[in-house]
Image (cartoon, helix red, strand yellow):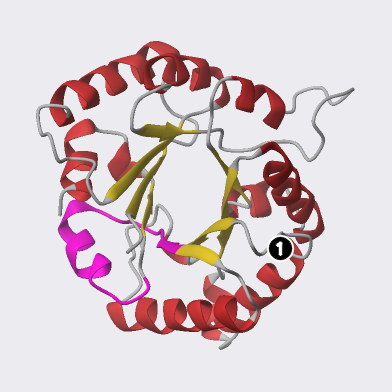
Amino acid sequence: MSKKIFAANWKLNKTPEEAREFVIKFKNDVFKTPDFFKGKEVILFPSAFSLEAVSSLCAGTAIGFGPQNIHSEKSGAFTGENSAEVAQSMKAQYALVGHSERREIFKEQDELLDKKNALLQVLGLNPVFCIGESLAQREAGKTLEICFAQMDKGLKSFDKSQRLILAYEPVWAIGTGKVATPEQVAEVHRELHQYLTKNAFKNFQILYGGSVKPENSKELLAIPHVDGFLIGGAALQVESFIKICTI
């Protein structure tokens, strides 16, 4: 049985010192519990300036980490971009790809995201590939159409024999306090699981993201094919993040 995944997306929060304080407190609290990591993966996605601080404290432990965004090329004249190869050298194991804020604010298209996913595979990093629909698309009944199209294009070059972590994030539920109903989550995750199975993906897990909190995490994690969470605001504080990880 696959481990449940609890991934913290800190977005544009935490200085390197604040990141270090978080990791130190998290380690002090969870390492008191011998079985804390049994059956679960914990991943931290700090901002670029804080990645080194996190890597220095997490490398060699059971706490995974990686960048929130990488460029589609290993290196070169790409001022301002983040190198996946550098992240790899820092012992990162994961990277976020295609978060809705990257799609919406920075206009990243699926063809670019496909290149990022393929590069991560070449480097041996695990992509956490984000998909999801806007409120207008949901109200138009296009949720599955949008999600399938994002996977068709964003995973076009993906080696299906390798591990994939997919994160379903209804855009209208990210940072809004709104949460998809259990019925809505169950429907989409069931369809995503069927899609990935039908399309011969061999090793995949599906996370839910969208205003996940300690108060709703137990109910959401009990839904079939919800293999964990991509957590935003509730992962900024050690206490609330641990509560979600230990439901």
Q: How many numbered markers are drawn?
A: 1
As drawn, the residue found furthest toward the top would be 17
The vertical placement of 208 against 52, above or below, is: below
Q: Nearer the viewer, residue 109 or 38?
A: 38
In the rendered image, residue 206, in percent from the top left (x then y), is placed at 45, 65
Image quadrant in which the C terminus is located = bottom left
Q: Residue at x 52, y 28 (%)?
A: 47
Closest to the observer, 1 or 247 = 1
Percent x, y of residue 109: 77, 57
Q: Nearer the viewer, residue 174 or 62?
A: 62
Residue 37 magenta-highlighted: no
Q: Position of residue 68 (x, y in %)?
A: 56, 37
Q: Residue furthest right?
A: 77
Q: Is 21 on the left-hand or right-hand side of 28?
A: right
Instruction: State which region is magenta.
Output: 206-225
Q: Quadrant of residue 15?
A: top left
Q: Is residue 186 visible?
A: yes
Residue that mark 1 sits on: 155
Q: Amino acid at mark 1?
A: Leu
Residue at horizontal 79 percent and vertical 60 percent from the top? 157
